[in-house]
Image (cartoon, rainbow, N blue to C red):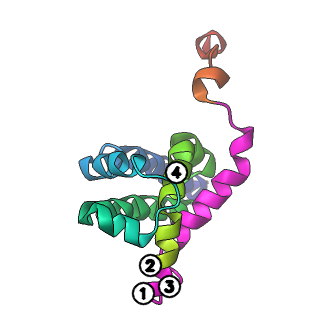
Amino acid sequence: MQLSEFRKRRRTQAAADLCRGFVEPDLARAIILLRSMPDGCSVEEFQTRGPEYEQAAQIVGNHFETMGLLVHENIASFRIVQELTGGLLLMMWRKIANWVEEVRVTSDNPRFGEWVQWLAERIAEREGDIRPAYEAHRDWAKHRR
């Protein structure tokens, strides 16, 4: 019973920590920069725009890399992560996927960005089943009574 309670507390804490991560100013700036880029940018395109764009890709990648590992290890709930960040992650992955692949090759590191890719692929598999919260939970208050 104590082990079950510990796991529940750990997952609740992980969810809270993931939520707090989205208020980090560096992550917010990185997302804003990457949102302006076309999907499928190469390393060369990132470098042409300036070092802050590659830094933004690294910040976003690191953030979602951590989420992917936490989900895989069942520390964070996949459902919570998908609801919290599914659409954003998929948009960011479209921006940085080619960059990640090129960095893997040029750095001879096939594990670079492995968990962000894993998480993006898992979320993409299920994204068609998800409706935006403002539609899916429109009558939420009525059902809480």
- The residue tagged 4 is 89
Nearer to us in this view, 144 or 32: 32
- Circle 2 packing at 10 Å, graded few (<14), some (14-19), many (20+), is some
Question: Alpha-carbon distance for marks 2 and 4?
Answer: 19 Å
- The residue tagged 3 is 105
Q: Amino acid at mark 2?
A: Val
Q: Are marks 4 and 1 in contact (CB under 8 Å)?
A: no
Q: Position of residue 129 (x, y in %)?
A: 74, 39
Question: Alpha-carbon distance for marks 4 and 3?
Answer: 23 Å
Image-based side of 108 in relation to 124, left or right: left
Residue 122 belongs to magenta span: yes
Q: Are marks 3 and 2 in contact (CB under 8 Å)?
A: yes
- Circle 1 packing at 10 Å, graded few (<14), some (14-19), many (20+), is few
In front of the other: label 4 or label 3? 3
In the picture, which quadrant includes the N terminus? bottom right
Image-based side of 62 in relation to 6, left or right: left
Image-based side of 4 in relation to 27, left or right: right
Q: Position of residue 89 (x, y in %)?
A: 52, 51
- Residue at disc 4, secondary structure: helix
In front of the other: label 4 or label 1? 1
- Residue at disc 3, secondary structure: helix
Q: Is residue 93 above or below residue 83?
A: below
Q: Amino acid at mark 3?
A: Val
Q: Are marks 4 and 3 in contact (CB under 8 Å)?
A: no
- The residue tagged 1 is 107
Q: Are marks 1 and 2 in contact (CB under 8 Å)?
A: yes
Range of residues picked out in magenta: 104-131
Nearer to us in this view, 1 or 28: 28
Q: Is residue 135 above or below residue 41?
A: above
- The residue tagged 2 is 103
Q: Are marks 3 and 1 in contact (CB under 8 Å)?
A: yes
